[in-house]
Amino acid sequence: MSHATYLLAAASGFVEGTVCPGGGAPSSPAVARLLPKGESVGAGVAALAASARWEPAPAVIVVATDAVGFRRLAFPFKDQRRIRQSLRFALESELLERVETYAVDHELIPEEEGAHAVVSLLRQDLLRGVLDAGAQSGLRTYRVLSSAHALLAARPAPSPEHVQAYVGAEEAFLTVLSGGHIDRIVSLPSALQPLLAEMAEQGMTRPRDVARLLAGESDDSRVNRSLLRTRLQHELQAVVGQIDRFLRVHPLPPDATSSVHGLYAPWIELDAAQGTVRLADPPRAAGGPERTALGILHELAAAPEGVLSAKGPGFYRAAATWSDILASVRRPLVALGVLLLLTLAAAGGTYGVRTWTLRSEIARTNEDLQALVAKRVGGNVPESARVSVLRDQLAALRERARAAARIAAVPYAVLGTFSDLSTQAATVPGITVRDVQISVAQATLEGQTPSYRLAETLRDKVGAIARFKGRTAKLTYQRAGEAIVYRITVQ
């Protein structure tokens, strides 16, 4: 266990973990825990570690993609340092909450005139809860990343243009690569995780149990699971429908490849190049060994090296110890020492000239500073305190500017959202809007519609609004006499 690493995958209602011994040895059998209603992800991680009786060791924690937000930002320059400095300012206009609420990571995609940044956001309270739970359980967590990035690290794409789909017991998502870089990550909302809890209550806790349920082999004289099977097939068909809509809205190049992973992968046939996806019956033959875990941990534990390494996007990376740093640079350290000696010898000849130049610049800078202090502060302040007073004035001015920018941005964001919703609603004839609610957390549109089709049309138009990019518009409706009352919500 001295070189072992724990690999955990934590979804909203399902946590699983395994031990990766290292040295090419196979991972241990996965342990899993269904979270009771109301139990947080952090509490689930702590309970799983306690029940498995794990000894203290390093750990990598993978959080569900549906808990992560994604944004795509364009920059007119390619310099990575400038992009990092500008990233939070660009996100302020994209988010309804403060940027400090999230842990932020990004991947840069260079282009001809600039660069794009695919940004991942995870709420700080969720990240802190996971890290604290791991620390209390003796887990030395050194990396936290999303399941989409983890799956791509464990199952690399075979081509630069690729669609990687995951449809598992706990979540579903799409990862789209363009030119070898992540172009977008799309979470697919579903009720697959609650169905997993129902199957567990009936004793179906192994992947083969789910396969027997879908094949109709789990029914007997005591238990008829036809309703549960029908609901599961309905949810899988809903996920397939979301993938189909995405392929129709975002067509892919003819040389694009695709792959499907997860517990329900054998039941889904996806051809990204042709833009087709369907629910297979009977399922296609699953390649590789039999599944050992219900969730994404089966794919990650089969090739954990990329997930356990410190490369790629992530929301948390622990600092390396001195021993780790020295161990990784044994040979380069000698070459670096020789290079340093040569550099010092070459710099000795220019040291005197450079020192004289810097002293001259310092003298001129001090003169300019004294003139600025005398102009801004005046002579009624002691000379020893003038620079501090000037610094305080500058800090106050910056804070007032930031406050004014925040106050001015919020009303325009709300008005812009209201205008976009009104414009889309006006394009659907026959539908009425009774109420529009816009808050920090979500936007809601309510009203009446003469048909379900018109409500779905309005939902698609709302979901296509630019400021809702990366989010999913959800539609609910019910009969109210002769009319149909609908509600469209965007988180």
Image (tube, rainbow, N blue to C red):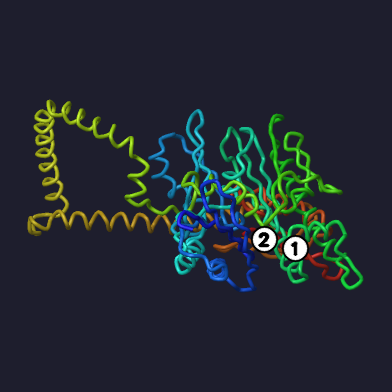
Determine which quarter of the picture holds residue 197.
bottom right
**Which type of secondary structure does the marked residue at label 1 adopt?**
strand
Q: Which mark is residue 476?
A: 1
Spot occupied by residue 480 in the image (x, y as percentages of width and height): 82, 70
The answer to which image quadrant residue 52 occupies is bottom right
| Residue 323: percent from left, percent from top | 33, 49
Type of residue at label 2?
A: Thr
Picture coordinates of residue 200, whole percent (x, y): 73, 68
Q: Residue furthest right?
A: 221
* Residue drawn at 67 percent across, 59 percent down: 170
Q: Nearer the viewer, residue 482 or 211?
A: 211
5 horizontally vs 375: left or right: right
Q: Seen in the image, is 128 located left or right of residue 251?
A: left
Tag 2 near tag 1, CB within 8 Å: yes
Q: Position of residue 452 (x, y in %)?
A: 82, 58
First reached walking from the N terminus: tag 2 or tag 1: 1
